[in-house]
Image (tube, helix red, strand yellow):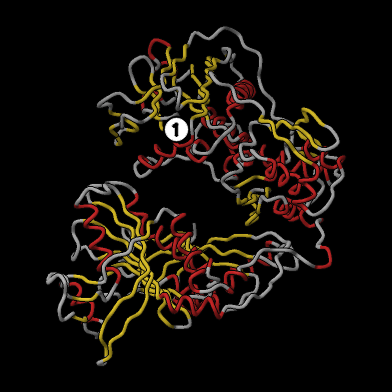
Amino acid sequence: MKVSLNWIKKYVFPINMNQNQISNILTDIGLTVKAINNVNNDFILDIEITPNRTDAMSHYGIARDLYAVLRFRGYKVHLLKPKINEDYCYQSHIKIFVQEYDKCIRYSGIFISGIKIEKSPYWLISQLESIGIRSINNIIDIMHFVMYELGQPVHIFNMNQIKDVKIVIKNAENNTHFQYSDNIKIKLDKEDLVIYDNAHPLSIGGIINHVESNINVKTTNIFVGSACWHSTIIRNIKKKYSKKIKTQYPYFFEKDIDPNQTVYALQRIAFLIKEIIRNKIVCSNVIDFYPNPIYFSKIKLRYNKIINILGKKISIKNIKKILSLLEMKIDYENQKYLFIEVPSYRTDVKREIDVIEEILRIYGIHKIPIYNNQVKISTHIKFFEKTEYEIQKILFEQLINYGFQEIISSTMINEKKYSYFFNSFLKRKEIQVMNPVNQSYKFMRSSLLFSMIDCIEYNYKNNRIKSYIKFFELGKIYYKKNDKFLEKPYLGIAIAISKKEKTEYNYYSFFYLKGIIEQILQKSGIYNYTQILSEHPLLENGISILYNHKNLIEIGKFKRTILKKNEIFYAEIDWKYLISIIKEKKIIYIPLSKYPTSKRDLSLFVDQTISFEKINQLIKKRENHIIKKVEIYDLYKGINFPTSKKSYTISFFFESKKETLTEEIINDSMKEIEFFLKKELKAEIRKK
């Protein structure tokens, strides 16, 4: 999120420190500043805000946190809340009707007349453009300003287009077509939350306006709505229509925003309109639908719990001071604990541990000493000392917790074309039993995949399971190679999806299965593995995981050309090799860093043949000691791209064990990485 430092200073003053000092303070309290840019005599901070901190997704929200930490550290600063208009001229004649109570937490609106659509004043244009928002007109600019000031999205309708002065919030009516612009028309889904007048749709969830409800140069009367929906509703709308319609409003709406701010946002808009437009502005009272008000949540905070978690006694005076600065009120107290009220805008603070984290954040994690240079942590040491059976039990419990079921299938399979193809590719032979009990099943399985497919198809055929299947099995495979009969144990893990089932599960199953495998490796203490594109003859778009250059795991999707009925995602682990790796593991202690981690993203074009793993391994060889982790964030190839190229967005995580990393250090490191990738891979760095 881009944040203007000049904007912040309107609420917190006086601040007698430079942009780098402020950046370091914000990073210390969990609002990591990724970059600082100088724009029009202003410093723009690019702040990485975690999804749960919806209260900090605005300029005033960040100012509120900055004020708390500066005040606690002894700076004589003040917090100024944005001014609002509370003078109303008349009772509103507009009525609000909400039919979808389960989707709408709160809806507030205000009628404003006497406006004049014109160019915004310079200060407003400059303020918005500093964070990358293009000026449109005074009314739209005010709406955007308040949205980025308070983190509360609003929507504006041309009052002349509202029929029978009525606002109705309900699901879309059947066969409703919605005209977004002259050339974009969409058919609404019956589950879409739509704002109507008496007869026509005005907006989809307050984020996509009908072309006729938008304001224009002739508009003199407007209706401003401010809503708090259940966040899943907006996420669904965004997902459904984002390819056709681009809007920044879902960024705010899809989070759990504060329902107690809707009216304040309207009052703020009314104030700014009166300040900016010199005409005689007339505002109605705020109409408000809020059936189940959400107020402060109450949490019990025990003093001994704070000590147990932090390992340090913080004075009661300091605890109360921090709570007060964070606007958490003390409802009741005694010598052992406090009952506190948490403001509704702190949607992330729900438990005692969350409050303790807030205290530590403002108090300063660097103030927590490590006594005798010892940190007590739990390790996997007992796991490595266990027998093979005990390791098996632990890993099986892990798979069961993920919703998998263990199966024990027959080691005998019928002859299949893909079985013969599989063994021919690996240059080995199937083992045929001389006198099988069943003539249809006379071959011993050479992969757990074959018996797993039989089990999956049997369950679907007999309607035992109708949607998706999650199985695992530990068993032996048998084959003949170089005139030797061989048997090896493998752990097979499969996710199957019925062709009848049309869900998103199909798309995510490969990544879900890969995530399960990564959890098993992490549990086993295996980290330094490599990934390459798989050459498995029966799996498509798969990967092979190697440890010490030896194949440990195969993951992929069973080829559609062979199995057309259902989709099967499969992973097979060399069990004996896995156990031997675990047994050889030794515990090495590496001190935890006391300093925060910073993240930077890099987008680049590379040749189609270059895998992320190759990039990852090249970066590891650089031995940059402040790079803690490298992850792939996005991969794109296709439309508007040359067929020989693809685009990666890669996330780099930086951390030092000695100090908080400055912008200069991280930026220098990123420049080195860019230069190295250009040189080694002929990569082209993509500017966002």
Mark 1 burial class by Cα count in 10 Å: few <14, some 14-19, many 20+? some
Compared with 291, 452 (above or below) is: below
Determine which quarter of the picture holds residue 272.
top right
Q: Residue at x 39, y 37 (%)?
A: 237
Q: Nearer the viewer, residue 291 or 312?
A: 312
The spot of residue 380 in percent (x, y) is 60, 68
Compared with 516, 344 (above or below) is: above
The spot of residue 113 in percent (x, y) is 53, 14
Q: Residue furthest left?
A: 439
The spot of residue 344 in percent (x, y) is 64, 31
- Count of all numbered marks drawn on residues in the image: 1
Compared with 49, 372 (above or below) is: below
The spot of residue 450 in percent (x, y) is 25, 68
Compared with 263, 230 (above or below) is: below
Q: Residue at x 37, y 54 (%)?
A: 508
- Residue 679 lies left or right of residue 460; in this view the side is right
At label 1, which amino acid type do we have? Answer: Ile
Give the residue pinned by disc 1. 207
Q: Residue at x 50, y 24 (%)?
A: 117
Q: Residue at x 34, y 69 (%)?
A: 542
Is residue 684 visible in the rendered image? The answer is yes
Q: Nearer the viewer, residue 179 or 29?
A: 29
Q: Secondary structure at mark 1?
A: loop
Determine which quarter of the picture holds residue 422.
bottom left
Is residue 282 visible in the rendered image? The answer is no
- Residue 19 lies left or right of residue 248; in this view the side is right
Q: Nearer the viewer, residue 54 or 330?
A: 330
